[in-house]
């Protein structure tokens, strides 16, 4: 999926969001944002949005002098998400289709910015309940359910911190639905925006799934850049679950009909690409066959 | 009022909005937006937002090869506003305080983007009725009303096309409230964004007020750059009415307590400066005395 002009502006906004956390002086923010514009103005046409992030975030990190710019927010997100799963677990397990509700929770987790300071537990809880009532805008869930029952191996590509706690719960429910199922989770090599890293994923997935390094240093996945084991699992697993926009952007170009994309559409560029409104929850099977 | 980093991003967005009207190729928009970033990255700290526009818009005009980039939208705005005044005139004249309602309509005109294609007359009409119910967030109207009754000369600085039709109606009501009142309207020297130019203002104000050239080629007013007659009237009129954010930005620094600022707060930078939320309608007397 190709980036367009809106992605240039969005990355300037993302940079400013980080500067607002680390800088007090408005003049410093001004100058540093101009440094980011210097980078943006030299990017060649044809990149994917995640490739812009790959170039811009190291510059942001250099400027603020910190490798993991969302470290605190990621911890806070995980804490909030753990509280939410605790509160919702029983309701979902007793629902007509726990697999469906757990999938929806995992996709909803992508929509809520759990890292917001001063979050109010009740507000987030009610927001999630509200989201769970919304239908999928693209819905291949029934086909997934059939395939899952026959599957032996699932590769699960996680996205953000916070959300990953809901992913764990979804994986637990999947494994109860298909007792023999083996799930491997792939996470990012190093901190990038608020994506869960291998270390963070290992902590959350402990006792539920094996975690491997996808090889990605970008906020998404470009399969050809993956580690050997990641690429092997990507093409050999019975089902690949790709969470979030970043993984979607790169993987949508792969000819692998075993991939299911689970995401909330969070920007106009992806919305235009999929032909759905922003905010849509998507559970979509990849139609490109190998 | 000093611009901050958000103004850099906002002007990149404004440029893209114009490119979307004049360009089909996404690659061309990408490259041209990068040209605008080249300009933005060289702007020195300390400028006013209208001074950024002063530098960026000529570049935009050069790129799209058109001097008046919002020409069509301005015409459409005036047509819609004329229809609205036709429908509302009787209601406002029969209200408890026609002066108050006409002032509010003139401020509301700033909030609605009348230039949107495919506008629906009913939607806009209902939107205006809704806005007329909202109170001013900063309200010096009563003091204005008293001063207006004693005034002989008013200088009225107009802002956008469309809105200017509501300004004319407000001026008519002012002149009925104070029969001897003389009102002079000041408008921009040349087309800049969707501001009304002298020529456009003359057409609208015909038979209601004399129109002078403020001398401004920016989407606002910096008094020291004004024509001689503008500066004289600015300091000698009994009341100066300054419409919109652009005029506010520059004039707020003037020591002239005869100025009333009538505006809708349309961006976070002005909202922070005034300490009110975005969307607030403001009728504020300047407190800086000469």
Image: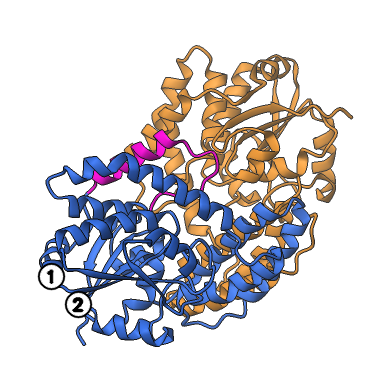
Chain colours: A orange, B blue
Residue B26: x percent and y percent? 75, 52
Q: Quadrant of residue B155?
A: bottom left
- Image marks 2 and 1: residues in contact by CB distance under 8 Å: yes
**Mark nearer the N terminus (2 vs 1):** 1
Whether residue B164 is visible, yes or no, is yes
The residue under the point 61% across, 68% down is: A60
In the image, residue A219 lies in the stretch drawn in magenta = no
Above or below residue A84? Residue A96 is: above
Task: Give the residues in magenta.
Answer: B111-134
Residue A153: x percent and y percent? 75, 27
Q: Chain of mark 2?
A: B
**Neighbourhood count class around disc 2 (C-alpha, 10 Å): few under 14, some 14–19, many 20 upward:** some
Q: Chain of mark 1?
A: B
The residue tagged 1 is: B147
The residue under the point 59% across, 70% down is: B57
In the image, residue B125 lies in the stretch drawn in magenta = yes
The residue under the point 33% across, 58% down is: B167
Work out how far the residue at label 2 is from the one at label 1, CA to CA, in angstroms.
8 Å
Q: Quadrant of the C terminus of chain A?
A: top right
Say what secondary structure mark 2 lies in.
loop
Residue nearest the viewer, comparing A38 with B234: B234
Say what secondary structure mark 1 lies in.
helix
Q: Is residue B220 left or right of residue B57?
A: left
């Amino acid at each position: 999926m190709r980036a367009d002009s809106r992605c240039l502006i969005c990355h300037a906004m993302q940079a400013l969001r980080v500067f607002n956390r680390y800088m007090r002086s408005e003049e410093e923010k001004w100058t540093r944002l101009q440094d980011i514009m210097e980078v943006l103005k030299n990017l060649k046409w044809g990149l994917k949005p995640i490739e812009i992030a790959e170039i811009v975030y190291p510059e942001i990190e250099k400027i603020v002098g910190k490798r993991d710019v969302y470290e605190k927010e990621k911890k806070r997100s995980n804490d909030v998400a753990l509280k939410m799963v605790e509160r919702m677990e029983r309701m979902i397990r007793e629902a007509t289709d726990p697999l469906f509700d757990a999938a929806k929770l995992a996709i909803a987790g992508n929509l809520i910015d759990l890292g917001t300071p001063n979050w109010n537990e009740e507000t987030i809880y009610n927001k999630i309940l509200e989201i769970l009532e919304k239908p999928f805008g693209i819905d291949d869930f029934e086909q997934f359910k059939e395939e899952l029952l026959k599957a032996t191996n699932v590769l699960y590509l996680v996205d953000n911190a916070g959300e990953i706690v809901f992913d764990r719960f979804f994986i637990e429910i999947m494994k109860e639905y298909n007792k023999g199922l083996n799930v491997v989770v792939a996470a990012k090599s190093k901190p990038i925006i608020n994506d869960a890293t291998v270390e963070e994923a290992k902590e959350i997935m402990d006792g539920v799934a094996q975690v491997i390094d996808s090889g990605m240093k970008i906020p998404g996945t470009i399969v050809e850049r993956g580690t050997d084991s990641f690429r092997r699992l990507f093409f050999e697993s019975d089902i690949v679950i790709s969470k979030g926009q970043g993984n979607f952007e790169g993987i949508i170009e792969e000819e692998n009909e075993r991939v299911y994309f689970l995401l909330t559409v969070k920007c106009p560029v992806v919305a235009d690409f999929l032909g759905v409104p922003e905010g849509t929850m998507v559970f979509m099977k990849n139609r490109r066959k190998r």
